[in-house]
Amino acid sequence: NAGVTQTPKFQVLKTGQSMTLQCAQDMNHEYMSWYRQDPGMGLRLIHYSVGAGITDQGEVPNGYNVSRSTTEDFPLRLLSAAPSQTSVYFCASRANRAGTDTQYFGPGTRLTVL
Amino acid sequence: GEDVEQSLFLSVREGDSSVINCTYTDSSSTYLYWYKQEPGAGLQLLTYIFSNMDMKQDQRLTVLLNKKDKHLSLRIADTQTGDSAIYFCAERLTGTASKLTFGTGTRLQVTL
């Protein structure tokens, strides 16, 4: 298994540009999430999904969209990038099974918005 | 809402024990986690404990939970240079599937 993969690893955008951060997992996990990590603030939940076709907002959803058309993929879209969205973005997945509480994280995408 | 707090930095000498502390505010049934993040990498789950437990041990790692004070600690015995990383405490309320609330992280520096 490749686990949780994220692309790209690094990205630089100009203010106002849009882009999609890709996340995929090959573990057939129902739950997937997007977090952003900023210095001194830990990780904050942006959006999450409990299964294909189902998404919900986390703590900091503004400026981001998600969709979950398949179990494997959970892309995060930045509609109009702003400097405040400069961050490291992590995707995570977890199985929906009793007794399983391990959330697997991808390696992250470092995004800079100029 | 949930709030999780940690001290920002801890320095220990190789071979000593490290104790990383965390406090949380939500008193509902919850899972509490410790994650490790090495430079440039994602988060790796080290261990977790359910709020009806007081202690959990896994090799060099010991997790202690004081429910009354809402205090969680991670003890690393015989700390090695490979343990240098940022350690995150996180909380998940029962029934909230993917929603983890993270602390700010504690940077552990292991010196020779």
Image (cartoon, coloured by chain):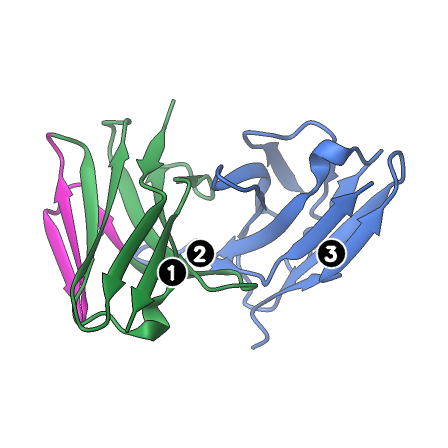
Chain colours: A blue, B green
Does residue B6 appear to the left or right of A64 in the view shown? left
Q: Which residue is mark 3?
A: A22
Does residue B50 appear to the left or right of A105 in the view shown? left
**Label of residue B45 in the image:** 1
Residue A110 visible in the shown view: yes
Instruction: Evaluate if marks 3 and 1 touch, with contact meaning CB atoms under 8 Å apart.
Output: no
Label 2: chain? A
Task: Judge depth for marks 1 and 2 and give the one in front.
Answer: 1
- Kind of element beneath mark 1: strand
- Where on the picture, by quarter, is residue A7? bottom right
Residue type (three-letter) at the residue carrying disc 2: Gln
Residue type (three-letter) at the residue carrying disc 1: Leu
The residue range painted magenta reads B48-68
Residue drawn 30% across the image and 68% down it: B111
Instruction: Evaluate if marks 1 and 2 touch, with contact meaning CB atoms under 8 Å apart.
Output: yes
Q: Position of residue A104 (x, y in %)?
A: 48, 60
Residue type (three-letter) at the residue carrying disc 3: Gln
Mark 1 to mark 2 CA distance (whole Å): 7 Å
Does residue B76 appear to the left or right of A37 in the view shown? left
Residues at marks 1 and 2, common chain? no
Residues at marks 3 and 1, common chain? no
Q: Position of residue B81 (x, y in %)?
A: 33, 73
Q: Nearer the viewer, residue A6 or A48?
A: A6
Mark 3 to mark 1 CA distance (whole Å): 22 Å
**Label of residue A103 in the image:** 2
Instruction: Name the quadrant of the C terminus of chain B.
Output: bottom left
Asked whether residue B65 is drawn in magenta, I would say yes
Q: Earlier in the sequence, mark 2 or mark 3?
A: 3
Which secondary structure dominates the residues rendered in magenta?
strand
Mark 2 to mark 3 CA distance (whole Å): 18 Å
Q: Position of residue B84 (x, y in %)?
A: 37, 65
